[in-house]
Image (cartoon, coloured by chain):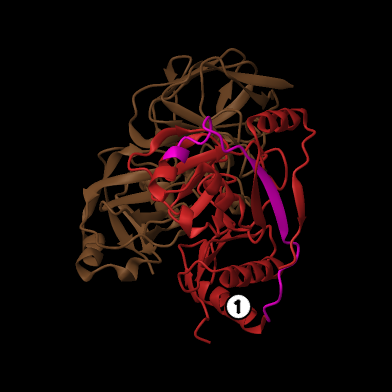
């Protein structure tokens, strides 16, 4: 049976995401997809969904949502104090939903992005192989008041709950971001190399699904490069000396030197950092 | 073998293949040839290859298990390959209206370059531009081949909003904004054709290696073409390109 989640209040910034849009980078289309893949996997696993079932990615201040029919949900990633009908619920567990239930969020406790999975995934439009929202590719780019998001209602009791599973949430708070040297790393002067290895950096307020800037200004004499490929996790050094960590909605090509490349876990960890948080780079090779 | 590329991992899901940094059509042919080879060699479900001016990036669906083996396999593939001609290259003819309404910077270019508007249009519509790759925005083509007489620096202060379809020049590049966006290029006209359609697969007919030629249309013709486009009756003129 068709059912829908109605947006009573949109919160700060929420989108529908899955693993993203593959195969279209050659047309300049970003990969997109959930910022934190670990949380997506956990939330879908708890509900025994397909690994790439579409979820809602919720940033810092959550929305207020009303369900039109029974289903089950699971919330993973950041802890944004979720409440069902005004009663606090936990992350990482199956939550039964009844017709008319209202899900809301409170004070952000840990992390930046929370993931709301629903039984069998959200059934919003699929464009170029993905349901991930992106400006001008999908009809919507962020949650807005009054919006209705489709899902399949389910009263069935066919699923066992995963009450006993413990998930390692250390990545939500760890400051150590795993990196590899990027294509232009070797062109950096020794002082800058060791600075990148040893210093702490802080997350700038200028951060979104495309990129996260770091606040520190480095002395940079590296020239721009001839436009080349970039990926989520590529760390660029701008002529002004700022480090920019490209995230899931990043463009496919860029002209700034690519000094570092985050590991997959590193990208997921960055997705959970908020303005003012401190990070350091942990070298992998 | 001094032109053999540098092959390095880019994180856990990417391998970057770099040739010497230059903008060159022979290099582009080589890149497209290798790109096709890689797509044949791997299953396209598992990888995605993009090219830029001098690089190929293979991005993997999953974390690469053994980077060393992967790099060896690519080296072997490239070593054995005999570079041939690329097939299926096409020329696309794109209408551009170069009037004052759309050509916001025509007057400025005219003054800076000491050219009449007619000369600007003549020099801009003459070349067969080479599509090097698509990047920056969905459907944004990086075109090579701009006449040196039209090369002009970007605006000191980028505009907050450039119209969809705007045709501009930035240094030695020219291109079309596929959607309205902020931008710093000098704008000389507008192209009504939308060649990126998210509801098609592939979403863009024009790809790396193809050629683009602009032709000048009047304001009336622009309006006519726009109407034909919205009715779905516009036929984009294209033909095979024989190198």
Q: Residue at x 39, y 64 (%)?
A: A182
User: Relative to residue A101, is residue A199 depicted above or below?
Assistant: below
Q: Where does residue A3 sit, x and y in percent of width and height? A: 68, 20
Q: Residues within 10 Å of mark 1 (few under 14, many from 20)?
A: few
Q: Which residue is rendered at x = 48% and y = 62% of the image?
A: B12
**Magenta-drawn segment:** B82-107
Residue situated in front as seen by the camera: A84 or B99: B99
Residue A229 showing in the rendered view: no
Residue B189 sits in quarter: top right
Counting from the top left corner in percent of width and height, residue A254 is at 44, 54
Q: Please give the residue where the numbered disc 1 appears in the rendered image.
A: B73
Give the left or right position of residue A200, taking residue B97 as reference.
left
> Picture coordinates of residue A265 (x, y %)?
43, 53
Residue found 48% across the figure and 36% down from its top: B181
SS for dot 1: helix
Q: Which chain is red?
A: B
Q: Position of residue A162 (x, y in %)?
A: 55, 38
Frontmost residue, A214 versus A268: A214
Work out which residue is located at the far top of the displayed protein and give it: A100
Magenta stretch: includes residue A110: no
Task: Please check the rendered image and state whether residue B106 is part of the magenta-colored stretch, yes or no.
Answer: yes
Q: Is residue A21 above or below residue B228?
A: below
Q: Main secondary structure of the magenta part?
A: loop
Image mark 1: chain: B
Q: Which chain is brown?
A: A
């Amino acid at each position: 049976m068709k059912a829908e989640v109605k947006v009573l209040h949109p919160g700060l910034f929420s989108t529908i995401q899955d693993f993203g849009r593959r195969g279209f980078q050659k047309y300049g289309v970003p990969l997109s997809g959930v910022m934190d893949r670990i949380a997506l996997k956990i939330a879908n696993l708890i509900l025994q969904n397909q690994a790439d079932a579409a979820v809602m990615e919720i940033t810092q201040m959550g929305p207020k949502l009303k369900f039109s029919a029974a289903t089950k949900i699971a919330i993973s990633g950041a802890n944004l104090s979720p409440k069902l009908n005004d009663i606090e619920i936990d992350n990482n567990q199956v939550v039964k939903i009844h017709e008319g239930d209202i899900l809301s969020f409170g004070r952000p406790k840990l992390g930046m992005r929370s993931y709301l999975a629903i039984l069998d995934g959200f059934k919003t439009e699929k464009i170029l192989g993905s349901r991930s929202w992106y400006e001008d590719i999908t009809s919507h780019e962020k949650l807005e008041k009054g919006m209705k998001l489709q899902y399949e209602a389910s009263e069935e009791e066919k699923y066992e709950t995963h009450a006993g599973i413990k998930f390692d949430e250390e990545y939500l708070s760890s400051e150590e971001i795993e990196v590899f040297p990027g294509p232009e790393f070797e062109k950096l002067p020794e002082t800058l190399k060791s600075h990148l290895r040893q210093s702490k950096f802080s997350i700038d307020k200028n951060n979104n699904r495309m990129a996260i800037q770091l606040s520190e200004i480095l002395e940079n004499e590296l020239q721009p490069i001839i436009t080349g490929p970039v990926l989520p996790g590529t760390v660029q050094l701008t002529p002004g000396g700022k480090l920019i960590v490209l995230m899931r909605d990043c463009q496919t090509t860029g002209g700034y030197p690519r000094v570092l490349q985050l590991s997959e876990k590193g990208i997921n960890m960055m997705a959970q950092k908020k303005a003012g948080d401190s990070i350091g780079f942990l070298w992998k090779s | 073998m001094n032109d053999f590329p540098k092959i390095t991992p880019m994180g856990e899901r990417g391998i970057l293949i770099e040739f010497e940094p230059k903008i060159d059509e022979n290099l582009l042919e080589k890149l497209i040839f290798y790109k096709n080879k890689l797509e044949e060699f791997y299953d396209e479900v598992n990888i995605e290859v993009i090219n830029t001016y001098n690089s190929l990036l293979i991005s993997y669906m999953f974390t690469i298990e053994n980077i060393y083996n992967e790099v060896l396999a690519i080296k072997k593939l490239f070593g054995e390959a005999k570079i041939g001609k690329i097939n299926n290259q096409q020329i696309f003819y794109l209408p551009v209206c170069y009037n004052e309404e759309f050509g916001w910077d025509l007057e400025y270019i005219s003054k800076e370059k000491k050219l009449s508007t007619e000369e600007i249009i003549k020099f801009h519509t003459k070349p067969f531009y080479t599509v090097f790759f698509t990047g920056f925005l969905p459907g944004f083509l990086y075109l090579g081949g701009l006449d040196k007489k039209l090369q002009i620096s970007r605006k000191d202060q980028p505009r907050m909003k450039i119209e969809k379809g705007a045709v501009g020049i930035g240094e030695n590049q020219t291109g079309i904004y596929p959607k309205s966006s902020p931008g710093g290029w000098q704008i000389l006209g507008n192209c009504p054709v939308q060649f990126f359609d998210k509801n098609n697969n592939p979403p863009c007919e024009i790809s790396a290696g193809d050629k683009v030629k602009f032709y000048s249309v009047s304001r009336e013709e622009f309006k006519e073409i726009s109407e034909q486009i919205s009715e779905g009756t516009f036929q984009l003129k294209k033909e095979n390109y024989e190198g």
